[in-house]
Image (spheres, grey):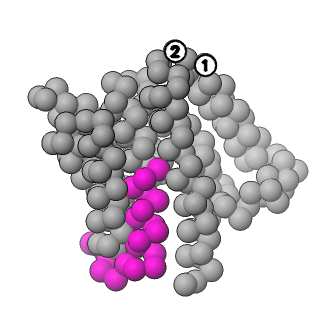
Amino acid sequence: MTKKQKKELFRKSFHVSSILMPLSYYFIFQNRKMMFLILIPLTVIALIIDIARLEHKTFKRIFFNLVGLLLRKHEIHNFTGATYLMISAVLCIGFFPKEIAVVSLAFLAIGDTLAALVGIPFGKRKILNTSKSLEGSLACFAGCFVFGLFFLHPVVAMIGAFTATIAEFSWIPIDDNIKIPIASGLVMSFVNMFF
């Protein structure tokens, strides 16, 4: 396993902890207003930190010394995945029904993590000339689908898991932390109208 692959697996070990956000919404805060009292200030703080890091060299150096190991190359000159995750959470919780918001955000934590944990060490078959593997994508789909079954109609969960998987391996140049939950949430909201 290369150094880059080890770094990505290390990132994913932190990434999976983001499932605490949707689970907190469902089991602890239980309504949108309560969740926003926590989520919006945290999102504003994440934005301020990223803007300060991008605009001020000293702050950038301090930030890089603290968490530089977790940053991907494109995050050095752009927002971090954590900031995109917070923005995604605000959008999902603000616009989607509760169960769909919970599931779409969990799809990011579960699916994206499983895709890496399986795809990096075991992925042999690349999909459509991307760096993503069939093995990683199947793990993403399976994890998302199983989780979705606890909250949604099986058809809605399956279509949502499929959408999350497509978003995860797609070449569309939008951060996965935005792409996966928003795409799957939109599709599940539409499909859910028929069940």
Q: Name which residue type carries label 2.
A: Lys
Quarter holding the N terminus?
bottom right
Which of the pair 27/70 is nearer the observer?
27
Dot 1 alpha-carbon crowd within 10 angstroms: few under 14, some 14 to 19, many 20 or more: few
Instruction: Check residue 33 in the rendering and tell me which mark sits there, or answer none.
Output: 2
Where residue 16 appears, x then y in whole percent?
Answer: 52, 53
Q: Which residue is mark 1?
A: 37
Whether residue 13 appears in this view of the structure is yes
In contact (CB < 8 Å): disc 2 and disc 1: yes
- Identify the element where label 1 is drawn: helix
Where residue 146 appears, x then y in whole percent?
Answer: 29, 51
In magenta segment, residue 119: yes
Where residue 106 appears, x then y in whole percent?
Answer: 42, 44
Residue at (30, 35) in percent of width and height: 151
In magenta segment, residue 100: no
Q: Quadrant of residue 50?
A: top right
Check the image and name the residue furthest to the right.
58
Q: Magenta region: which residues?
A: 109-132
Residue at (37, 25) in percent of width and height: 98
- Identify the element where label 2 is drawn: helix
CA gap between label 2 and label 1 equals 6 Å
Where residue 145 appears, x then y in whole percent?
Answer: 27, 50
Q: Quadrant of residue 128?
A: bottom left
Instruction: Check residue 193 in the rendering and tell me which mark sits there, or answer none.
Output: none
Question: Is residue 65 depicted above or below 121 in this figure?
Answer: above
